[in-house]
Image (cartoon, helix red, strand yellow):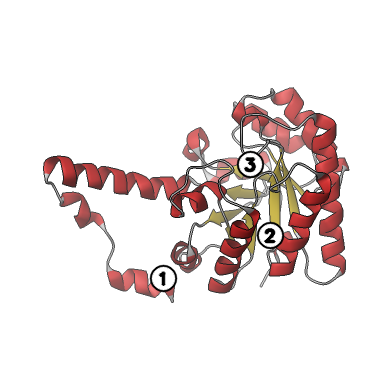
Amino acid sequence: MMNFREMHKPGDPFILANAWDVGSAKMLQGLGAKAIGTSSAAHAFTLGRTDGGNVTRDEALAHAQDLIAAVDIPVSGDFEDGFAEAPDACAETVRLSAEIGLAGICIEDTIEASNQVYDFDLAVERVRAAASAASAARALGDDFFFVARADGVMTQAYDIEEALRRIRAFDRAGADGLYVPIPNSMDDLKRIIEATDKPVNVLAAGPYARHSHQEFAALGAARISIGSALARATHRIIHDAGRSMFEQGDFSALTQGISGAKVDKLMN
């Protein structure tokens, strides 16, 4: 089996299929996923919590362990801001992630999943510490792929120029891959990908879900993640079917499910 690092080929992106529980992870593997990602938002939904800093590091690690045990393909963790401000704490998150068997993680520059971001210098120091911990983890055995996220364009905390400044600095600080979720245009996405020789992750969510794998490949993307988009699509079905049932007494939406036999096959 190809290791996680080898999957990151600019111009030939693989899909990092973000799951939210053991069942979804097993189904996604059964459908052909080469790697599974956690999703901080989707995981929070399974706990009955809102998105945004409402899951602890211990809970995220335990959740990741459940997915690792459920599938035999690499699993990568979506670990928000590393669950702490201090660079040393980000490094500890990387160390713990490698210890439980994750193939990699991404850490963003937002403050506790808010619309605020860490100052540039601190953001870079956090990446440098996490990258150093990832390097130390690799020296002890299995490979570990660390992605640094610049989320400020998505949260409107800064513009594309600042995002480019940050990912170039994150590259120099030792990140294995870079990630700027939901830039304002495909032209901006192209600029992001061309700003580094490192693999770049693209988020196929929101307006970017309208673009194809082929389009992302043509820009040079190395990885396509789906974040919480698939979980939200599942919740849309619950929402729409629930409204039909409770408001109109209409159960017809329930006829659209797949058979138990198909689910069983994918689970196994």
The answer to whether marks 1 and 3 mark residues whose Cβ atoms lie closer than 8 Å is no
Q: Residues within 10 Å of mark 3 (few under 14, many from 20)?
A: some
In percent of the image, x 12 and y 41: which residue is there?
A: 248
Residue 214 can be seen in this image: yes
The answer to whether marks 2 and 3 mark residues whose Cβ atoms lie closer than 8 Å is no
In percent of the image, x 68 and y 64: which residue is there?
A: 102
- Mark 2–mark 1 Cα distance, whole angstroms, equals 23 Å
Residue position for label 2: 7
**Mark 3, secondary structure of its residue:** helix
Amino acid at pointer 2: Met
Residue position for label 3: 218
In percent of the image, x 62 and y 24: which residue is there?
A: 156
Amino acid at pointer 3: Ala
Residue 26 in percent (x, y) is at: 48, 68
Q: Is residue 208 above or below residue 103?
A: above
Image check: 210 left or right of 219?
Answer: left
- Mark 2–mark 3 Cα distance, whole angstroms, equals 17 Å
Image check: 42 left or right of 194?
Answer: left
First-in-chain label (1 vs 3): 3
Residue position for label 1: 266
Which of the two residues, 124 or 113, is positioned nearer the viewer here?
113
First-in-chain label (2 vs 1): 2
Residue 255 in percent (x, y) is at: 19, 56
Q: Residues within 10 Å of mark 1 (few under 14, many from 20)?
A: some
**Mark 2, secondary structure of its residue:** helix
Residue 157 in percent (x, y) is at: 66, 25
Q: Nearer the viewer, mark 2 or mark 3?
A: 2
- Tell me the quarter of the picture where residue 144 sits: bottom right
Q: Is residue 76 above or below residue 242?
A: below
- Mark 1–mark 3 Cα distance, whole angstroms, equals 31 Å
